[in-house]
């Protein structure tokens, strides 16, 4: 009888330990899944932010290039107009210098 009780207690303890190990394994797997999900979300957020920044930079560069092209066209038109006026009216070197300075100032302000 004592042997049967000892075996029963031993089996009970073994079952309890097995259940405790199984619970620990389930908890560990749950924690691992939670960490994997958190890392996945963090990576997705980081990629989204990187893409947003890249798009913003690309748009900024495109706008800057477009503005510089417009300024270049405006300067070319202004220079052509100034040269045309100077060719039609004998105004001298002083007016040409003044026009060049005005164009340079306009370019500096525009940029």
Image (tube, rainbow, N blue to C red):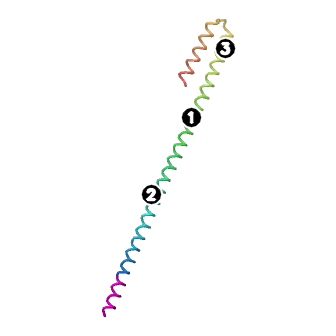
Residue at 67% x, 14% y is: 84
- Asked which quadrant contains residue 54, the reply is top right
Q: CA distance from mark 3 to mark 1?
A: 30 Å
Residue 25 percent across, percent down from the top left: 42, 70
Asked whether the beta carbons under mark 1 and mark 2 sit within 8 Å of each other, the answer is no
Residue 22 percent across, percent down from the top left: 41, 74
Residue at 43% x, 62% y is: 34
Prevailing secondary structure class for the magenta stretch in the rendered image: helix
Residue at 58% x, 18% y is: 104
Above or below residue 53? Residue 65 is above
Span shown in magenta: 1-12
Nearer-N-terminus badge (2/3) = 2
- Given residues 26 and 5, the one toward you in this image is 5
For disc 1, the marked residue is: 63
Q: Is residue 89 left or right of residue 19?
A: right
For disc 3, the marked residue is: 83
Residue 68 percent across, percent down from the top left: 59, 28
Circle 3 sits in a helix, a strand or a loop, which is it? helix
Nearer-N-terminus badge (3/1) = 1
Circle 1 sits in a helix, a strand or a loop, which is it? helix
Residue 38, labelled with which disc? 2
Which one is closest to the eye, mark 1 or mark 2?
2
């Amino acid at each position: 009888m004592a042997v049967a009780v000892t075996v029963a207690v031993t089996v009970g303890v073994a079952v309890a330990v097995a259940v405790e190990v199984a619970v620990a394994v389930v908890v560990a797997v749950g924690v691992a899944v939670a960490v994997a999900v958190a890392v996945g979300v963090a990576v997705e957020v980081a990629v989204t932010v990187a893409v947003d920044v890249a798009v913003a930079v690309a748009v900024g560069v495109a706008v800057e290039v477009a503005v510089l092209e417009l300024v270049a066209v405006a300067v070319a038109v202004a220079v052509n107009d100034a040269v045309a006026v100077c060719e039609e009216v004998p105004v001298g070197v002083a007016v040409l210098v003044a026009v060049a300075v005005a164009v340079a100032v306009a370019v500096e302000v525009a940029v």
